[in-house]
Image (cartoon, rainbow, N blue to C red):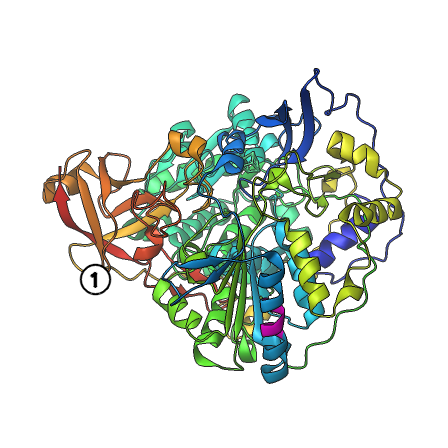
């Protein structure tokens, strides 16, 4: 990794402590043979990158006689290596979706009625700009918040920062990966980042704790998982549900939900008491190991057995198996980890377990990501906020290093520490992303302006004052994707076909709105291709080459300590913190402590949720190609539970949660693959938005049933696996 790239990575992760000064030379792209854009007469093959999820796999779209035909992987792309996942290949369905938003809409009557008037773009953006000016004059620019997901939000973020608000957030922090990134940052000084820096390809022992690779279809990880399994890697899966990944496991541990931290402590007890850990690595890089080792003595496998339901011999055998392959032994940090309320400390325990295996910076463990060096566009400086961010007053959550979405929602509800009067929501369906939809609805009622920018009429769009239809990824340019990965590269998204109606790309929406707000100086370029040319030429790279190939790759660089990457840990001690002085100082456990999870009401079952390989969140259920593969979800029920309640495969039931909320109808799947104390459904179904005609009412929504959540005291994440259901009614 060149020095500049490493410095920038640390800066991005906000953890620049102790990093050496660095040079300024850009990494030059390597010319890769073969053009992605050649094709037969009447057939055009155009490189872009996928947006069916946010992994950004390089794609080649084929257009035949002007009509979008198919999408495939771009062989030049190191993320996908020329192979898309099943969702990605269904990307064509997003373009042809008859339910997609077509023209700007303004609310006719009450919020949530989903009754609209079609307006022109000029009418919609003029209305929004006038409202924003009024809000700024009355409350200050900080009264506007943006919720955004994915690279498509970059230009809207730019407009919002130019307008003057610091309240820019994504559910991917407080509702997903935040506890993991904080837990690893507290331990190693750096985040896990996305794509995760996990060297799955080279691991010889992979431990998955509730992480269901293969159902959670992040392409690179799934391909590397398959490669590792093909090479004979040992797989250990810990999950209350026998996932697809469990089918590849040598050891499957069907743990009691909520007790993972007890298992991790017991594993670490075995590694330390049996002296199986990497003593040399720990002595060289660790801080506070003696206190840590003394603390661990109490957590024997016998202690963990009644907590977790995992037998002591199995705990010992799996710990020894991990030690056998270290440092090429990897405990996956997970991605969506907002589960039980102990999430940051559980993630920190996973980080510590990896530290004992000596795998940070080592082959088969965690590599050091690298990147091309493409300078940002030289925009004018943004105005400085007088009030600061609204989401985390008095640093209530001292280790939150990103904005907390639910903190913005709370401020919108309470008006404290100051009022929030407008939400912009880009490409995220807050009704399915945030827990407790009634809180979201109550907060919306306090707004003067709710704008939703999306491609489909989602539930949150149904509550908007103005809905702006975005073109789908195959119809638009997006920002350059300068990725941090195991090798440096840039990928490029460009239009393949025209949008079918009045849809516009996000960059055009953001730029036009900025113009109406008198912020034109923040968009000195006339056309987005001018912006691309400027940035790439500043890096010594060719825009035309990127446009033709879709991908520019830089030369490979060292990614492991053994290859010369400096072993730096930008924590306050400059070491891997087995004992964390910064946690102790802030009044938290300096070494993770286990607390038994609260049980649900008698006779109820913990509601667990997860992903399916053919859908992304709640965004793809109306895509006809993907819904053909999976039109609705099912509720997984253990045979003993099913017998107790007289349920059989295929029964249509409703789930009722502890607060009396009842779901849509959902079919029962009776299976040994789930423990008897919980049930499981795939997230994202059970749509209630009338505009989603194809997906409406199909399956049950886990989000609707997630009325309870526990807030992580370290970083404000919302744990959602704390809801319990019973079976409300039955029909065959
Ligand atoms: S993982 Fe699949 S859906 Fe996501 S970007 Fe890659 S191909 Fe597209």
Numbered range of the magenta stretch: 128-132
277 or 79: nearer the eye?
A: 79
Residue 40 located left or right of residue 365: right
Secondary structure mostly seen in magenta is: helix
Q: Residue at x 37, y 42 (%)?
A: 239
Residue at 65 percent of width and 61 percent of height: 157
- Check disc 1: other Cα within 10 Å, few if <14, some if 14-19, many if 20+: few
Query: Which residue is painted at 23% across and 39% down in the image?
Result: 667
Residue at the far top: name it: 40
Q: Nearer the viewer, residue 100 or 603?
A: 100
Residue picked out by circle 1: 660
Q: Quadrant of residue 33?
A: top right
Name the residue located 14 percent from the left edge and 48 percent from the top edge.
Answer: 729
Residue 220 position, x and y percent, is 58, 34
Q: Quadrant of the C terminus?
A: top left
Q: Quadrant of residue 519?
A: bottom right
- The quadrant of the rendered image in which ligand 1 is seen is top right
Residue 58, image quadrant: top right
Q: Position of residue 249 (x, y in %)?
A: 41, 30
Number of labels in the image equals 1
Q: Nearer the viewer, residue 233 or 724?
A: 724
Residue 281 lies, with reference to residue 287, above or below; the image says above
Residue 180 or residue 460, whichever sits in front: 460
């Amino acid at each position: 990794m060149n020095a500049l790239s490493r410095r920038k990575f640390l800066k991005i992760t906000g953890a620049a402590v102790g990093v050496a000064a660095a040079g300024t030379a850009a990494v030059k792209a390597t010319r890769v043979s073969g053009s992605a854009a050649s094709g037969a007469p009447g057939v055009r093959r155009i490189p872009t990158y996928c947006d069916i999820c946010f992994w950004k796999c390089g794609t080649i779209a084929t257009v035949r006689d002007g009509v979008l035909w198919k999408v495939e992987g771009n062989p030049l792309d190191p993320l996908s290596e020329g192979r898309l996942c099943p969702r990605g290949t269904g990307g064509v369905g997003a373009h042809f979706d008859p339910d997609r938003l077509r023209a700007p809409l303004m609310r006719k009557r009450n919020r949530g009625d989903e009754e609209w008037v079609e307006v022109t773009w000029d009418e919609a953006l003029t209305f929004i700009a006038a409202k924003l000016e009024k809000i700024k004059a009355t409350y200050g620019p900080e009264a506007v918040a943006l919720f955004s997901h994915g690279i498509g939000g970059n230009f809207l973020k730019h407009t919002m920062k130019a307008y003057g608000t610091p309240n820019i957030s994504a559910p991917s922090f407080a509702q997903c990966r935040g506890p993991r990134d904080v837990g690893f940052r507290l331990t190693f000084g750096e985040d896990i980042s996305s794509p995760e820096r996990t060297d799955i390809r080279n691991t010889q022992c992979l431990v998955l704790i509730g992480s269901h690779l293969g159902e959670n279809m992040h392409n690179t990880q799934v391909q590397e998982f398959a490669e590792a399994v093909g090479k004979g890697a040992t797989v250990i899966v810990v999950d209350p549900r026998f996932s697809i990944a469990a089918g590849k496991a040598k050891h499957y541990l069907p743990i009691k939900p909520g007790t993972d931290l007890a298992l991790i402590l017991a594993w670490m007890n075995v590694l330390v008491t049996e002296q199986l850990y990497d003593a040399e690595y720990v002595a060289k890089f660790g801080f506070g190991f003696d206190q840590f080792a003394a603390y661990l003595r109490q957590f024997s496998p016998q202690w963990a057995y009644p907590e977790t339901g995992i037998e002591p011999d199995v705990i010992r055998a799996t710990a020894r198996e991990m030690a056998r392959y270290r440092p090429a032994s990897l405990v996956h940090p997970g991605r969506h980890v907002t589960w039980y309320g102990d999430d940051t400390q559980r993630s920190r325990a996973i980080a510590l377990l990896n530290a004992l295996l000596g795998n940070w910076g080592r082959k088969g463990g965690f590599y050091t990501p690298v990147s091309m060096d493409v300078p940002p566009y030289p925009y004018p400086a943004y105005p400085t906020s007088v009030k600061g961010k609204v989401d985390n007053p008095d640093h209530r959550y001292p280790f939150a290093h990103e904005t907390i979405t639910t903190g913005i929602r709370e401020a919108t509800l309470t008006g404290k520490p100051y009022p929030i009067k407008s939400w912009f929501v880009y490409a995220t369906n807050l009704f399915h992303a945030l827990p407790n939809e009634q809180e979201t609805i109550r907060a919306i009622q306090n707004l003067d302006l709710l704008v939703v920018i999306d491609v489909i009429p989602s539930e949150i769009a149904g509550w908007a004052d103005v809905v702006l239809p975005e073109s789908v990824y195959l119809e638009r340019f997006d920002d350059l994707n300068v990725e941090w990965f195991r090798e440096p590269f840039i990928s490029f998204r460009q239009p393949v076909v025209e949008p079918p109606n009045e849809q516009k790309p996000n960059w055009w929406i953001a730029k036009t709105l900025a113009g109406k707000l008198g912020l034109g100086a923040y968009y000195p370029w006339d056309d987005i291709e001018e912006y691309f040319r400027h940035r790439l030429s500043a890096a010594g790279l060719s825009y035309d080459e990127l446009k033709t190939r879709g991908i520019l790759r830089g030369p490979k660089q060292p990614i492991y300590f053994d290859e010369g990457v400096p072993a730096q840990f930008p924590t306050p001690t400059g070491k891997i913190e087995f004992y964390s002085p910064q946690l102790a100082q802030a009044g938290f456990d300096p070494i993770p402590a286990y607390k038994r999870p609260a049980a649900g009401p008698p006779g109820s079952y913990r509601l667990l949720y997860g992903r399916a390989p053919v859908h992304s969140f709640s965004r793809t259920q109306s895509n006809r190609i993907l819904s053909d593969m999976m039109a609705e979800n099912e509720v997984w029920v253990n045979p003993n539970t099913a017998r107790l309640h007289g349920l059989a495969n295929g029964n249509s039931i409703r789930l009722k949660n502890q607060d009396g909320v009842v779901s849509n109808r959902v079919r029962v799947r009776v299976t040994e693959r789930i423990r008897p104390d919980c049930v499981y459904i795939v997230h994202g179904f059970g749509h209630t938005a009338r505009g989603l005609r194809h997906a409406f009412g199909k399956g049950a929504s886990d989000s609707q049933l997630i009325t309870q959540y526990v807030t992580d005291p370290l970083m404000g994440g919302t744990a959602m696996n704390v809801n319990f259901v019973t079976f409300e009614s039955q029909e065959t």
